[in-house]
Amino acid sequence: MRSLRSPRPLTGAALCAAALALAAPAASAGDFGEVEASPQPARAGSSVSLTTRDCGHSRSATVDAGALGGGTATLRPGGDGGALVGEFHVRPDTRPGNYGIAGTCADGKDLTGTVSAGTVGAQGRPMPRGAVRTGVGPTAEGADATEILAGTGLMLAAAAGGTWVLRRRHGGGWSGRRPG
């Protein structure tokens, strides 16, 4: 006699395939243009120039730089090769990191980009990155020889103690047999 299988796995697979097939055209339809920002990284409190060549024949674009405190920047013709250019100011208290910016060309095409914000110290040199030695936790430089030796010693002591306990439970050997 032939057993009947449940149609649920087949139905689920068919529904997944149909959903993927329907989503594929939508995924490729959203071609995004790119907005380039310079300088990279941008300093807190400085100006950032934006450039795009992806607006085709559009004469303007707007870019939202609110994440960096720049509000909305308008890009106008002014670059070589039909590029649209504009600028915004980075808020002075902006924390270092990567920030997404997004905009729209006058013809409706979407634009995206990234602005890296960093901090700059005296004489225009980048501020140092990494951990500060506070006496607690790991640091960017790694452990020194004393810490490595202390950790190794603790590991060996734990291994020796565990071996001693196991040997004692098994009655003097690893075989598990009691002397008799």
Image (cartoon, rainbow, N blue to C red):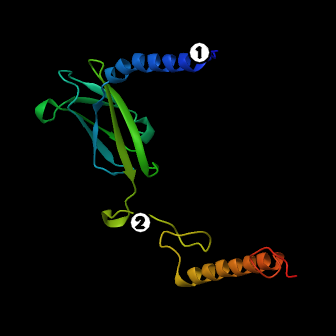
Residue in the image at 28% along x and 26% along y: 61
Q: Residue 42, position in %: x, y?
A: 34, 50
Residue in the image at 36% along x and 66% along y: 122
Left or right of residue 45, residue 86 in this image = left
Whole-number angstrom distance, CA of label 1 to CA of label 2: 61 Å
Residue type marked 2: Pro
Q: Identify the image quadrant of the C terminus.
A: bottom right
Q: Residue 23, position in %: x, y?
A: 41, 19
| Disc 2 element | loop
Q: 39 and 164: which one is in front?
A: 164
Residue in the image at 30% along x and 18% along y: 108
Residue type marked 1: Pro
Residue in the image at 33% along x and 37% along y: 113
Mark 1 / mark 2, whichever is N-terminal: 1
Position above or below: 25 against 71: above
Count of marks, rendered view: 2
Q: Residue 14, position in %: x, y?
A: 49, 17
Residue 95 is marked as none
Q: Is any part of residue 48 visible from this angle?
A: yes
Residue receiving disc 1: 7
Residue receiving disc 2: 128
Left or right of residue 147, residue 120 in this image = left
Q: 153 and 7: which one is in front?
A: 7
Position above or below: 8 against 61: above
Q: 152 and 9: which one is in front?
A: 9
Q: Is any part of residue 91 visible from this angle?
A: no
